Image: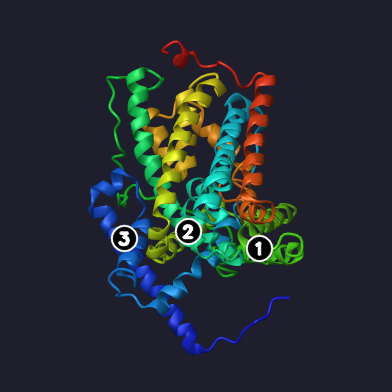
Amino acid sequence: MFPLETIESESLNTLLFYTACLGILLLIGVIIRIKLKIFKRLIIPASLIAGFIGLILGPHILGLIPVEMMDTWSGYAGVLIAIVFAPMLIGIEINVKRFKETQAVSQLMYSWGTSLIQWGIPLVLMGLIFTPIFGVDPLFGTLVEIGWSGGHGTAGGMVGVFEELNWSDGGSLGLTTATIGLLVGIIAGTIIINYGVRKGYTRYMTKRDTVVQSDKPDIIPSSDQQPSSVSTIQSEIVDGYGFHLAIISVAVIIGWILQDIIESFIPGMPLFPLAMIGGFIVGIMLKRTNFYEAVDLETFRRIQGFALDFLIVSAVATISIPVVVDYFVPLLIMSIVMLVTMISFFFYVGPRLFEKDWFEHSIILFGTACGVAAVGYMLLRMVDPKLQSDAFIAYGLRAPFTSPFAGGGLVTASIPILTVSFGALGVGVTSIIIMLLIFIFAKFVGIFGRHDNTFFTKN
């Protein structure tokens, strides 16, 4: 089922050298991130900085990094994204009572609404304008949700999918879209917060307050340093990281088996969402044994973080600049359209969906839908420094019902395949209809309506 190829020692040495060079880029990115405070204010991760350094040093600009190394790096994303997703559903628990108390249901509807909009509007534009008039590939319409809600990790992981669908340009464009979304989330989110403070929409920050960026030290003092994971199994048996990597390996193998099974039904389905399902299956099996006591979720987070950092560096460094230039006008138009749409969604849906603290609940979701979770969290801390609202708790509770599917999950991975099968217009209209049905249902059961008077009494 899984053919094994003989790899010569010289190839392994080359792979090790290329990976070491990637690590050097990441270290340079860390140094720049610490030394230049503007990157701290914008919470730009070191991996993204390192990726752009690699892009500058690559064959499209300075030509200092050979094409052979770039070709190898371009294959990392599809492998590393499986490691990122495999343990995602292990240890997931849901508190039903808190789910209701914290307005997590409303956050869930908001999250799905943004993803459905990011599928619907771009694909409708593809079907009506960009493809018939300008000849743009319909798959271009799938990039916003992949890059904005999914982030660089998902965009990098989808490179292989676009190649399978005979649109290799999608990889570079997806990563470019993710970068645009990150900047939109940070810049537009900050502007929205300052506007909201002036208008009095924020509950925990007033006009007298200032939006203060985090003053956390870049390097944690030794006196404050804490273990990022714990030992759960005796080291003479196996190292803790080795044990957790073994669990991830089983999840990835299950994902491969699932991929092979469904290949005849859904050609082109990528490995990473199926590895996530594999992790869910492994988690269920482990819970039935005493081995589950040896599972440390923070160790999984560390492994995911390591894989994601190297994924982003390799993916961003291998962006094809000529492709981005060719699609510059569609990218610009689509980015402007989606920026206006996301801001309109924020101000129309937010105050009607949440009974209280609508701004706080909406801003963390806005940041996540445009950038990544870290952007959403940053924006929330700006308006709710002490986390007095339930926005962050609700954000975590709604995650099991969104992360496995949208913003990089199963549905995200399936949308390009569905677009090829049923057309951009059909998938786009269907997405918008589903979104409208969700909010019609929410209106019918009393969730969606004029709830938070901090907005309506000031307008």
Identify residue type, mark 3: Gly
Q: Is mark 2 on a helix, strand or loop?
A: helix
Callout 2: few (<14), some (14-19), or many (20+) C-alpha neighbours within 10 Å? many
Identify residue type, mark 2: Leu
User: Gap in Å between the C-alphas at discs 3 and 2?
Assistant: 14 Å
Q: Where is residue 45 in the image (x, y as percent from the top left)?
A: 37, 52
The structure residue drawn at horizontal position 50% and vertical position 24%, both measured from the top left corner, is 348
Q: Which mark is residue 308?
A: 2
Residue 377 falls in image quadrant: top left
Callout 3: few (<14), some (14-19), or many (20+) C-alpha neighbours within 10 Å? many
Residue 188 falls in image quadrant: top left
Q: Residue 29 carries which label?
A: 3
**Marks 2, 1: nearer the viewer:** 1
Taking the image as shown, residue 319 lies to the left or right of residue 117, namely left
Along the viewing direction, whichever of 141 and 367 lies nearer the viewer = 141
Q: To which residue does mark 1 refer?
A: 268
User: Gap in Å between the C-alphas at discs 1 and 3?
Assistant: 34 Å
Q: Where is residue 63 in the image (x, y as percent from the top left)?
A: 30, 74
The structure residue drawn at horizontal position 66% and vertical position 35%, both measured from the top left corner, is 433
Q: In which quarter of the image is the N terminus?
A: bottom right
Q: Quadrant of the C terminus?
A: top left
Along the viewing direction, whichever of 17 and 63 lies nearer the viewer = 63
Task: Work out whether mark 3 precedes mark 2 in sequence or the reverse, and give the earlier one.
Answer: 3
Residue 381 in sight here: yes
Task: Work out whether mark 2 precedes mark 1 in sequence or the reverse, and give the earlier one.
Answer: 1
Q: What element carries label 3?
A: helix
Above or below: residue 90 compared with residue 114:
below
